[in-house]
Image (cartoon, grey):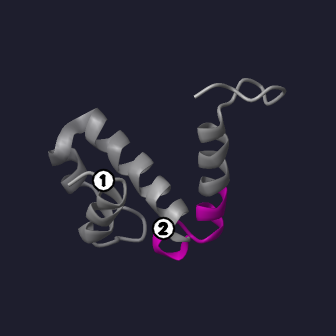
Amino acid sequence: MRPLGGMAGKSLLDLAAEHTYKELEQLGGDASKLDIPKQTGAVLYSVQAIIDNGGFQYLFENDFPSKPPYSQFVDAYRRIGMQ
């Protein structure tokens, strides 16, 4: 994704993620309180980063702040077409 002019080289995706994470912080880290598009982005960014860094085992060994059900992660991947 190309950076937006005048936005310190940040892509639209980076800006959207920043906005989503600020809102998530205001909601106490509970992604279920975000609207579905933001929830999907926040969950996918978080979960995929964990998987990329430590694999599925690492994902299942750690709790998220609000302890969401794993179905929230599965639902987010399904919304983007990943079965």
Q: Nearer the viewer, residue 79 or 34?
A: 79
> Magenta: predominant secondary structure element?
helix
Task: Give residue 64's quadrant in the image.
Answer: bottom left
Relative horizontal placement of residue 23, taking residue 52 as reference (left or right) = right
Of the numbered discs 2 and 1, the one sitting upstream in the chain is 2
Mark 2, residues whose alpha carbon is within 10 Å: few (<14), some, or many (≥20)?
Answer: many
Mark 1, residues whose alpha carbon is within 10 Å: few (<14), some, or many (≥20)?
Answer: few
Residue at 46% x, 74% y is: 32
Residue at 67% x, 52% y is: 19
Residue at 36% x, 53% y is: 80
Residue at 63% x, 47% y is: 16
Q: Position of residue 81 (x, y in %)?
A: 30, 53
Residue 26 magenta:
yes
Circle 2: residue type: Ala
The tag on residue 81 is: 1
Q: Which residues are magenta?
A: 22-34
Q: Position of residue 66 (x, y in %)?
A: 42, 71
The tag on residue 31 is: 2
Callout 2: helix, strand or loop? helix
